[in-house]
Image (spheres, rainbow, N blue to C red):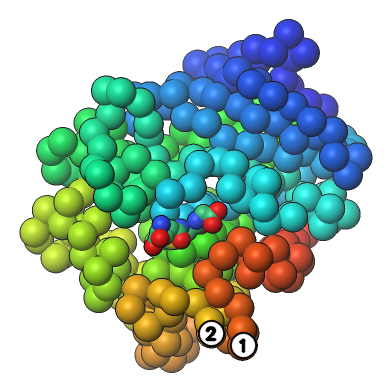
Amino acid sequence: MLVLDNDDVATAPAIKAEITAQHTLHGGTLYFLKHDSAATKTPMALSVFVPEGEGPFPVFLWLSGLTCTANNFTEKAGAYKKAAELGLIVVAPDTSPRGEGVANDDAYDMGQGAGFYVNATQSPWAAHFQMETYVTRDLLELIGAQFPTDMSRVGISGHSMGGHGALTLAMNHSNLFTSVSAFAPIASPVHCPWGQKAMAGYLGPNHDAWEIYDAAMRLARGKALSYDDILIDQGLADPFLDTQLMPHLLEQAAKVVGQKLTLRRHEGYDHSYYFIASFIDDHLEFHAARLKT
Ligand SMILES: N[C@@H](CCC(=O)N[C@@H](CSC=O)C(=O)NCC(=O)O)C(=O)O
């Protein structure tokens, strides 16, 4: 049963979402939505694919990378045929709050399009850049209230900055997620220029605050032990591999605590959505196997 009305406005107690577009594909429906987030204090955009049938369906939540909107994954990953077959709801939110009153930076790796899935504590970011609370509270509440979901079965995945988001949110909110995977994730923001810039800007100079959002450090502290395996895919022709991503740090951290982590290295694949499209079915199957009732 789908809760959204066909008058283009859906309401539930305290939750409202506007359907901005909808398309039928692979027997299911892809919705583009806008809703107000109490965490970011802005409207937030997202897409939601609902497979054919009654539900309740498990949820695959995707977090995108730097410069992305909700549309990059939706349009480029080619995820929906397999999601329809597996009976998964697929949710792809935007990567940051946006708008004229929202702080920004001229560079692509900070500000709008680069929220890093953290709760900012520093000015001018703290006013709206509350992406951790947005994803783990407002977004999940919306999906749970408006779609035929089983919110006890949610898997999380993402790419690059979104891979860092998927890993850290899975470890910091293990009560919300059953399974976790990532494509070319930023393994340790503390050790790479993208991460150092974002953490300093959003969280300030105290490195204790950064470590909460550092996947390799969280892993080494046993924060993923509720997950039976973590699937990571990494292209070996990825230009960011050695300078920004460093997935070997995840392998090393997992070893320290006996965490199972499957890191697959793929010769010839780069950082693009062509890489994601090549292996997204494996990730959907990885999650579906763990989200089965
Ligand atoms: N413009 C930048 C790199 C931007 C980039 O590659 N973004 C990736 C994610 S990188 C890590 O989070 C992305 O997903 N882009 C969108 C897409 O559709 O490909 C540069 O030139 O270095």
Q: Name the kind of residue labelled 2 in the image.
A: Leu
Q: Horizontally, is 213 left or right of 56 in the view?
A: left
Residue 284 seen in the current view:
yes
Upstream in the sequence, badge 1 or badge 2? 2
Which quadrant of the rendered structure holds the C terminus? bottom right
Q: Which secondary structure, mark 1?
A: loop
User: Residue 6: x and y, percent?
Assistant: 77, 13
Res 288 → quadrant: bottom right
Q: Residue at x 72, y 44 (%)?
A: 89
The answer to whether mark 1 and mark 2 are in CB contact below 8 A is: yes
Is the residue marked by circle 1 packed among few (<14), some (14-19), or many (20+) residues within 10 Å? few
Q: Name the kind of residue labelled 1 in the image.
A: Glu
Residue 272, compared with residue 269, is above or below; it is above
Q: Residue at x 37, y 34 (%)?
A: 97
User: Residue 36: x and y, percent?
Assistant: 45, 22
Q: Nearer the viewer, residue 140 or 240?
A: 240
User: Residue 110: x and y, percent?
Assistant: 28, 49
Q: Horizontally, is 37 left or right of 195 in the view?
A: right
| Residue corresponding to mark 2 | 236
Q: Residue furthest left?
A: 205
